[in-house]
Image (cartoon, rainbow, N blue to C red):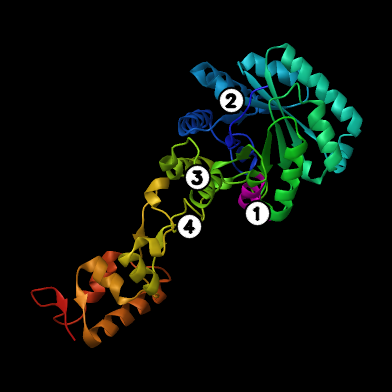
């Protein structure tokens, strides 16, 4: 089987991401996003053709556009589902099945039957020329011994195994231990798929990669079932700027892609969303702004332009005098400085938000004869 260089990215925005309640991408939007993801540098893009007739049509169009090598049909273990993937033009298929006793119990299948049927379906897909991968639902709550047995029973048939933390119930320390053991015993590359039920998807993904996982699955902006999936933009930025692991992707497009996903999904990004949120590189506090203006590295770990963002400064109740001088090119001195700042803070409090530059100018102009010809506001 193929050897995958660490670290490869599996995008599931168009599959698991769309499973977020209320999210429905139109065919046109899905095609546009798939092209953006491919151009960005994503290694595999998951599509689930069995969802609907519209999804099958989208899959056929994408395969016909020359994206088949980057697409994988994510589907259940059924021959008709494999046949559907073939009809759409897929070259890769990702079959999924539960691994935990809890989830196997819900479908009435024993662990032994699961391995046997999985091998049969892998053989069926291989016999029709497909390249096969397997995803284990609820892997992290399954017996480690069973997980190893399952993976290695399929090792000669699959390209990689995706271990799913379906309930997002690992912690970073447990994730590191879990994936270190799994990767040491697995005869194929391991991909991790983290959910964000406890807000740990990014941290768990980083820990799993540090432990030896060669691939990770995630969604742009972190959309997905329940609390979502590992946000690709957070994982990539953490790898690059914190661990020094730079992947062959176009980092400068991260913000633009996330903005498109936000627009088409209808799921608004939190203003304080790491990396791509509107406030991710926005400063208001007086001490922070003063330090930032002297040296941006004081309060920005990296240049926001590297992820398609830019720095900005806001004026509000927490601002100091330096921000006024920066935005207005006017130096404020003496007692008048305190009066202007007091009025700005009061107005910000009254409006319940930061103020615009024009609003600040109006406040400054409300003082009698505020400037001399050099633009200095005197006491």
Residue at 56 percent of width and 46 percent of height:
235
Q: Is residue 140 left or right of residue 305?
A: right
**Residue 200, located in which quarter of the rendered image?**
bottom right
Give percent across and percent down for residue 286. 37, 74
Report if residue 242 is visible in the image: yes
Mark 4 vs mark 2: in front: 2
Residue at 58 percent of width and 22 percent of height:
59
Q: CA distance from mark 3 to mark 1?
A: 21 Å
Q: Which one is earlier in the sequence, the residue at label 4 or at label 1?
A: 1
Q: Secondary structure at mark 4?
A: loop
Which residue ends up furthest to the left in the rendered image? Answer: 373
Q: Secondary structure at mark 2?
A: strand
Q: CA distance from mark 4 to mark 1?
A: 19 Å
Give percent across and percent down for residue 326. 25, 67
Report if residue 166 is visible in the image: no
Estimate how packed mark 3 is, as few (under 14), some (14 to 19) or many (20 or more) residues with alpha carbons within 10 Å: some
Which residue is tagged 4? 271
Q: Magenta span has 202? A: yes
Which residue is tagged 1? 200
Which residue is tagged 3? 262
Give percent across and percent down for residue 341. 31, 79
- The span shown in magenta is 198-208
Q: Secondary structure at mark 3?
A: helix
**Residue 14, located in which quarter of the rendered image?**
top right
């Amino acid at each position: 089987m193929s050897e995958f260089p660490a670290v490869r990215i599996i995008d599931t925005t168009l599959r698991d991401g769309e499973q977020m309640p209320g999210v429905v991408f139109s065919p046109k939007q899905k095609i546009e996003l798939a092209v953006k993801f491919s151009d960005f540098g994503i290694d595999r893009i998951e599509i689930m053709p069995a969802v609907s007739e519209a999804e099958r049509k989208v899959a056929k169009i994408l395969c016909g556009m020359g994206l088949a090598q980057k697409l994988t049909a994510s589907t259940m273990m059924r021959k008709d589902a494999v046949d559907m993937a073939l009809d759409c033009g897929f070259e890769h298929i990702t079959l999924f099945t539960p691994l935990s006793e809890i989830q196997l119990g819900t479908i009435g299948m024993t662990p032994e039957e699961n391995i046997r049927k999985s091998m049969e379906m892998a053989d069926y897909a291989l016999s029709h020329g497909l390249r096969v991968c397997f995803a284990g639902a609820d892997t992290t709550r399954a017996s480690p011994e069973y997980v190893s047995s399952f993976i290695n029973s399929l090792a000669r048939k699959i390209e990689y195994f995706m271990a799913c933390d379906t309930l997002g119930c690992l912690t970073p320390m447990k994730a590191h231990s879990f994936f270190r053991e799994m990767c040491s015993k697995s005869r194929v590359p391991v991909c991790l798929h983290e959910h964000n039920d406890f807000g740990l998807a990014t941290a768990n993904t980083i820990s799993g990669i540090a432990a030896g996982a060669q691939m990770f699955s995630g969604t742009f902006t972190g959309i997905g079932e329940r609390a979502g999936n590992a946000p690709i933009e957070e994982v990539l930025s953490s790898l690059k700027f914190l661990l020094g692991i730079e992947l062959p992707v176009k980092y400068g497009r991260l913000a633009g892609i996330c903005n498109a996903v936000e627009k088409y999904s209808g799921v608004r990004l939190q203003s304080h969303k790491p990396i791509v949120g509107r406030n991710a590189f926005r400063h208001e506090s007086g001490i922070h702004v003063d330090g930032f203006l002297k040296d941006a590295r004081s309060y920005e770990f990296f240049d926001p332009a590297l992820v398609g963002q830019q720095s900005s400064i806001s004026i509000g109740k927490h601002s100091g005098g330096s921000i006024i001088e920066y935005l207005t090119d006017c130096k404020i001195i003496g007692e008048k400085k305190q009066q202007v700042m007091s009025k700005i803070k009061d107005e910000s409090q009254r409006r319940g938000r930061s103020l615009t530059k024009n609003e600040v100018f109006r406040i400054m102009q409300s003082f009698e004869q505020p400037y001399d010809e050099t633009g200095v506001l005197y006491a």
